[in-house]
Amino acid sequence: MFHVERDIIQKWLKDKNIRIKDEIEDKMLRFADMIHSANQKFNLTGLKTRTEILTELILRSLDPVCDIIVPRGTRFADIGSGAGIPGVPLAIFFSSFSGTLIESSKKKTEFIKSAVEELGLAGINVICDRAEEIAAGALHREQYDWVFARAFGKLYITLELAAPFVKQKGYLYIYSTIVSEQIPAQTLNHSDKLGINIMSHKQMGDIKLSKTGLCFKKEKNTPNKYPRKYPIIKREAEKA
């Protein structure tokens, strides 16, 4: 079982010059199968086959970040986790990671919780709530070394919702096809107000990130007034 999918993982590992334990590979395959099975019951993702799920959701979540250094005790947050992407693949791949997956859909949250339990991902917490509500409290504010967002929405909105979670000198990585030169000045000004600054490709390379996506570094505390209510952010983002 999973012969085709296993070959895909092996090719990906060879291309990346990476070695992993068999149990990590097994968990990737099991997670792809869980998403595939859940998709038969409710609309978890638009991808229909295990191969698509493995390639597009799991391996593409790891592609840009698989070389970063993750010391034991490193904490991450996944904002708008959906089917557990990228949070679950990151937790499978990096055993030193602990953290929180945030998703506002109850059905999707229940799926993520069951996957985390079945895969034995210790140190992973799943919360069903909106990111702006969680970020407003002290428990999760500026507590994470890494914050990840994939397919979350417009950049302006993502920055305001995610920045409050990032600790000083931590990183916000956004899976995106946008390059930094394409970011509007108003959005960059907004990121500066939030205490995060866009990193250059060289700076991304220095921390072993690939040169795809966008990475912001937390240089100063995010003012307490952020994040604001979602309709306010959305309305402002439409003008950016």
Image (cartoon, rainbow, N blue to C red):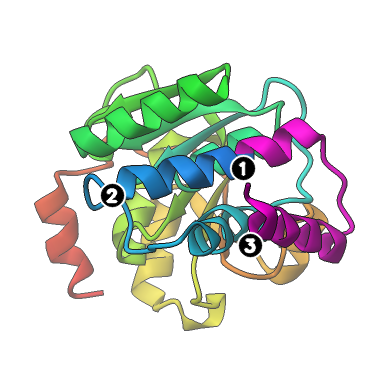
Residue receiving disc 3? 199
113 relative position to 119: left or right: left
Residue found at the very far front of the displayed protein: 1
Residue at image x 63%, y 70%? 212
Dominant SS of magenta comes to: helix
Q: Residue at x 23, y 53 (%)?
A: 43
Residue in the picture at 49% in, 77% down? 178
Q: Is residue 238 above or below residue 123?
A: below
Percent coordinates x, y for residue 181 in the rendering: 54, 82
> Between marks 3 and 1, how big is the CA–CA gap?
30 Å
Q: Measured from the top left, where is residue 32 in percent x and y?
A: 51, 47
Residue 25 x/y as whole percent = 71, 41
Report the mark closest to the observer, 3 or 1: 1
| Numbered tag placed on residue 40 in the rendering | 2
Mark linked to residue 28: 1
Residue type at tag 1? Met
Report the side of 106 relative to 14 (left or right): left
Query: Of the residues shown, which amino acid type is indicated by label 3?
Result: Met
**In-front residue for pair 16/235:** 16
N-terminal-most mark, 2 or 1: 1
**Range of the magenta residues?**
1-27
Q: CA distance from mark 2 to mark 1?
A: 19 Å
Q: Is residue 126 magenta?
A: no
Q: Secondary structure at mark 1?
A: helix
